[in-house]
Amino acid sequence: MAMSKPLIASLLLISLLLLHLVEADHELGNAIYQAPAYPPTQKIDCDGACKGRCRLTKRKDLCKRLCGSCCGRCNCVPPGTSGNYDACYCYAHLTTPDGRRKCP
């Protein structure tokens, strides 16, 4: 019985330490992926940005419509004609109901 009290105390201490580490990791993860606390003050030219983004696609009208919708919500369009989603977090994470990327 004398051994069980120190064992219980150490297990309790270890579990509290583990809980603290998990919470700290969760907070750090949220800080990395969190959108800026304030919106950009200037609106970008979505038509011009989407024209550049969609210039190489065969379905220009569809691409411009989807890009314009995403740009209107996010106020950003990634550079180039494809990829570069890391430049605009919001644009990269808008999805269709099926879970596919909405933005070209």
Image (spheres, helix red, strand yellow):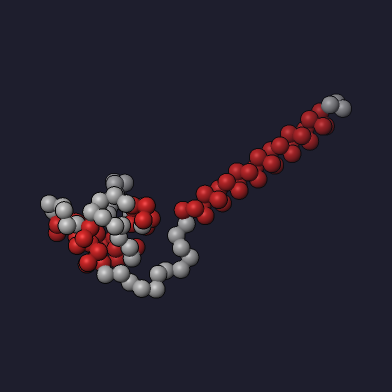
Relative depth, front residue between 3 and 65: 65
**Residue at the spot x=26%, y=67% of the render?**
46
Question: Quarter of the image holding residue 7?
Answer: top right
**Relative image position of residue 19 (x, y in whole percent):** 64, 43
Q: Position of residue 92 (x, y in %)?
A: 34, 53
Query: Quick one: which residue is furthest to the right in this view?
Result: 2
Left or right, 39 with reference to 49: right
Q: Is residue 8 left or right of residue 55?
A: right
- The residue most toward the bottom is 41
On the image, the x and y values in percent for residue 61 come to: 14, 59
Q: Say above or below: 63 vs 4.
A: below
Residue visible at 60% across and 43% down in the picture: 22
Q: Is residue 75 left or right of residue 29?
A: left
Q: Nearer the viewer, residue 60 or 82?
A: 82
Residue at x 73% of width, y 34% of height: 11
Q: Quadrant of the N terminus?
A: top right
Q: Is residue 65 visible?
A: no
Q: Quadrant of residue 80?
A: bottom left
Can the viewer see residue 89?
yes
Q: Is 47 left or right of 74, judged from the image as shown? A: left
Give the residue drawn at x 74%, y 37%: 12
